[in-house]
Image (tube, rainbow, N blue to C red):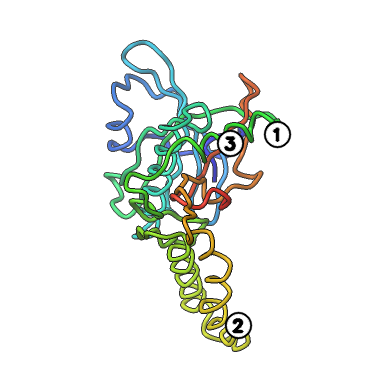
Amino acid sequence: MNGTLRNNDDVEGPRNLDPNVLAVLGGVTAILNIAYRQESPWAKAFSLTVLHNDGFEERYFMKACEVSVGHHGKLALMGEFESTLAIHAIIPEFCPKPTAWGTFKNDPNSHFYICKFYDFVEGVPEPSSFCEKLAQLHSTHSSPEGKFGFHCTTYNGNLPQDNTWCDSWEEFFANGLRHILKIREERAGNNNLQLDALLPQLFDKVIPRLLRPLETEGRKIKPSLVHGDLWYGNTGIINETKKGIIYDPASFWAHNECK
């Protein structure tokens, strides 16, 4: 799901905004439009057009409703907000400005995420300027204490990532992969004996041989903020400026070659 979806006004959205949404938007004097945009297996998306008490109209994107429910829905939307906030702090023009995330007052089991709304044009961003901004994201800042990880859980789709702070990239990468494999087993069952037979060699030999040399004999990796789920479906071209941006991140501080 992204923060910049195209019109689909044939589908009716909610008639009223939840009090907690109005509270985080601040100073709303009128709700001009609420339009359904699209949905994923985990969330529905709406555009909101409101009039603020300063007389200006503002358009927002809201990811929310029935399927962003429960513990995982709450953490996923919080992770998206915190990820976008971290990217926006480094390169504000490279992602939508995040507004808030929270829980609906009228439905405490459902949650929302709100950011600036953009109209997109078809296509993918121009490679040169887009990659320049991506390189800037990866090279100009590092994590607060020089560790790999993130301060909250982020979700790659419906997969929660293990972002526990680690001193080395090898440790963080191995922990994250073990976590994903554990989720696979929980969701699909322990039914792949061939894969299980390969895991000891993967963790005891392959990962150390590939990654440990990057951080030994005086070599170091500076943790870089990465999008975490970067592919063309999470990029867009803003209609007004024709500039490329990224959205729907699942960020963490990582080796800069990680997406």
Pick the residue in front: 32 or 171: 171
Density class for disc 1 (Cα within 10 Å; few <14, some 14-19, many ≥20) is few
Location of residue 90 by image quarter: top left
Location of residue 179 by image quarter: bottom left
In the picture of the structure, the residue carrying the numbered disc 1 is: 127
Q: Using residue 190 as the reference point, say whether residue 30 is left or right of it.
A: left
Residue extending furthest toward the right: 123
Report the Cα–Cα distance between label 1 and label 2: 37 Å
Pick the residue in front: 215 or 118: 215
Dot 1 amino acid type? Pro
Pick the residue in front: 241 or 150: 150
Density class for disc 2 (Cα within 10 Å; few <14, some 14-19, many ≥20) is few
Dot 2 amino acid type? Leu
Q: Using residue 112 as the reference point, say whether residue 233 is left or right of it.
A: right
Image position of 147 with respect to 104: above or below: below
Contact check, label 1 and label 2, Cβ < 8 Å: no
Q: Which mark is residue 195?
A: 2
Circle nearer the viewer, 1 or 3: 1
Residue extending furthest toward the front: 217
| SS at mark 3 in the image | loop
- Residue depicted at x 58% and y 50%: 257
Dot 3 amino acid type? Leu
| SS at mark 1 in the image | helix
Density class for disc 3 (Cα within 10 Å; few <14, some 14-19, many ≥20) is some
Report the Cα–Cα distance between label 1 and label 3: 22 Å
In the picture of the structure, the residue carrying the numbered disc 3 is: 5
Query: Residue 83: x, y in percent?
Result: 42, 44
